[in-house]
Image: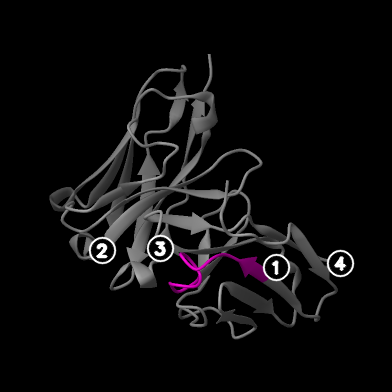
Amino acid sequence: EVQLVESGGGLVQPGGSLRLSCAASGFTFSDYSMNWVRQAPGKGLEWVSYIITISSIIYYADSVKGRFTISRDNAKNSLYLQMNSLRAEDTAVYYCARVRGSNFAYYNMDVWGKGTTVTVSS
Amino acid sequence: QSVLTQPPSVSAAPGQKVTISCSGSSSNIGHNYVSWYQHLPGTAPKLLIYENDKRPSGIPDRFSGSKSGTSATLGITGLQTGDEADYYCGTWDSSLSVYVFGTGTKVTVL
């Protein structure tokens, strides 16, 4: 079964750090680009970051640029999101999702995890 | 702030049809393929439509997608109570180099 399982969420104080993980199974992880998407309470989906198969191309939303770092370990079938200088507005459910598409024009997310909750509060 | 605009909500009786619009610009919808996602609170979002009008395996043909210029539309026919969810369009924005989601539309079955 194709599956993505996020972990690492929790309660953190403003200015703190957290590292999210996403474990992939049931498919050849190294063949797929990956991304993170979040949903703040009462808000819509917000794309956070993208990483290509060999980590050579990475993009971030302006709202997290300079504070978040996406990475992956293909040997461990895992995707990561290092979140630093966290703010209250980063409070959200964070989802990892598999990206399909031969190039960005075809970009879509066909497999999603169930999410992990990050709460930034003092 | 999303660059793709959707109506906040649509509703219809069971068995009826609803359409959800998604309005963008030349740098996103006008330049790239559109996807649609269904999201029930507390669950993982699900891909409904990709490349404007293609359905992944397992998605019933009650769901359809189309695109014209800088706008896209999702149609749901034979509405069921299980279709109550939030629906989002999404595409790559070639000018911003980011993926953009629509503002989201809540579907209510009356």
Callout 4 secondary element: loop
List the residue tagged with mark 4: B110
Residue lying at the far bottom of the rendered structure: B61
Label 1 or label 4, whichever comes before in sequence order: 1
Callout 2 secondary element: loop
The quadrant the N terminus of chain A occupies is: bottom left
Q: Disc 1 versus disc 3: distance between alpha carbons? A: 20 Å
Q: What percent of the width, then of the height, locates residue B24?
A: 57, 65
Q: Is the same chain shared between marks 4 and 2?
A: no
Q: Is residue A88 one of those drawn in magenta?
A: no
Q: What amino acid type is highlighted by mark number 2?
A: Tyr
Q: Disc 1 versus disc 2: distance between alpha carbons? A: 31 Å
Q: What percent of the width, then of the height, locates residue B42?
A: 59, 48
Is A87 situated left or right of A82 in this image?
Answer: right
Q: What percent of the width, then of the height, locates residue A44?
A: 60, 49
List the residue tagged with mark 1: B82
Is A26 situated left or right of B22 in this image?
Answer: left
Q: Chain of mark 4?
A: B
Q: Is the same chain shared between marks 3 and 2?
A: yes
Q: What amino acid type is highlighted by mark number 1?
A: Gly
List the residue tagged with mark 3: A111
